[in-house]
Image (cartoon, coloured by chain):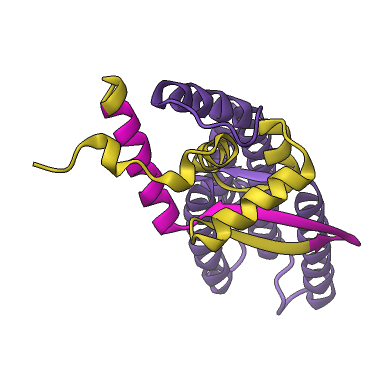
Chain colours: A yellow, B purple
């Protein structure tokens, strides 16, 4: 028997912004900074801070580039990020009786 | 959204659903954009394969060069436009694109190999165009309709 679902919750995703970011990125192969910002409805600085934290945790991969002369940032889930988030969501569903 | 508020599991699931709903619009735009790109690229590849049957390098070298240059310019233009408009890619679409592109490329290689078989009628040339374009263009249509 595995541990209680509550123990399998990942603290890194308990923050609303990080949870929303992970959820948004789960729906896409890759998304740019602006798409994420519009989808979640947060400011540039908040998005930047939380994306960096998720990148430091190895959950998200960030790619920077240019389109013409404009800098652009893309983010995508890493394979370990996908796995960790799927486990977190599964634990949430079990706790709430949906899983 | 309150960025630092702790949430209950129920609130987390609700927030997750909302975030994914918010991302649907961006994902839909990404699917339509890549789909359009696939359709155009497929038609261009099919067109090149067909026109090479008309302008064979051994018979009409100038025509062959003109077609190749026009093809390169067209592919570069749509790739640049795609790169400029690209913002997100729905999950699984890069694999779909790669599959369609690979099949179209293989069919294009077969069409090029057919150059040694001699001149072909208009019906066969049109068929080559359709067959080479189909995998990538149909992939694109599927993406746009999704």
Quadrant of image for the N terminus of chain A: top left
> Is A34 displayed left or right of A86 in the figure?
right
> Is A69 displayed left or right of B68 in the figure?
right
Query: Is residue A96 depicted above or below B120 in this figure?
Result: above
| Residue A32, horizontal then vertical, whole percent | 70, 48
* Residue at image location 46% in from the left, 28% down from the top: B12
What is the magenta range? A66-94
Between residue B139 and residue B107, name the one nearer to us.
B139
Quadrant of image for the C terminus of chain A: top left
Between residue B58 and residue A28, name the one nearer to us.
A28
> Is A47 displayed left or right of A70 in the figure?
left
Residue A11 belongs to the span the image colors magenta:
no
Between residue B36 and residue A8, name the one nearer to us.
A8
Q: Is residue A39 visible?
A: yes
What is the residue that sits farthest to the right in this orientation?
Answer: A69
Between residue A58 and residue B121, name the one nearer to us.
A58
- Number of marks in the rendered image: 0
| Residue A16, horizontal then vertical, whole percent | 56, 34
| Residue A12, horizontal then vertical, whole percent | 47, 48
* Residue at image location 28% in from the left, 26% down from the top: A95
Query: Is residue B139 depicted above or below B8 in this figure?
Result: below
Picture quarter containing residue A54? bottom right
| Residue A17, horizontal then vertical, whole percent | 60, 38
* Residue at image location 75% in from the left, 42% down from the top: A34
């Amino acid at each position: 028997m595995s541990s209680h679902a509550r123990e399998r919750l990942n603290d890194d995703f308990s923050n609303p912004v990080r949870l929303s970011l992970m959820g948004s990125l789960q729906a896409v192969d890759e998304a740019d900074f602006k798409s994420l910002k519009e989808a979640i409805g947060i400011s540039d600085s908040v998005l930047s801070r939380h994306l960096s934290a998720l990148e430091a945790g190895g959950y998200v991969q960030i790619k920077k580039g240019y389109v013409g002369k404009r800098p652009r940032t893309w983010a995508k889930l890493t394979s370990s990020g996908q796995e960790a988030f799927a486990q977190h969501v599964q634990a949430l569903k079990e706790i709430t009786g949906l899983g | 959204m309150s960025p630092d508020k702790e949430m209950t599991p129920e609130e987390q699931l609700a927030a997750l659903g909302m975030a994914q709903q918010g991302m649907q619009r961006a994902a839909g735009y990404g699917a339509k954009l890549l789909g359009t790109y696939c359709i155009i690229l497929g038609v261009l590849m099919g067109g090149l394969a067909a026109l090479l049957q008309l302008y064979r390098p051994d018979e009409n070298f100038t025509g062959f060069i003109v077609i190749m240059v026009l093809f390169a310019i067209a592919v570069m233009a749509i790739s640049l436009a795609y790169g400029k408009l690209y913002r997100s890619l729905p999950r699984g679409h890069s694999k779909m694109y790669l599959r369609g592109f690979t099949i179209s490329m293989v069919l294009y290689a077969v069409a090029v190999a057919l150059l040694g078989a001699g001149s072909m009628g208009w019906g066969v040339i049109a068929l080559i165009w359709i067959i080479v374009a189909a995998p990538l263009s149909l992939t694109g249509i599927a993406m746009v309709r999704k």
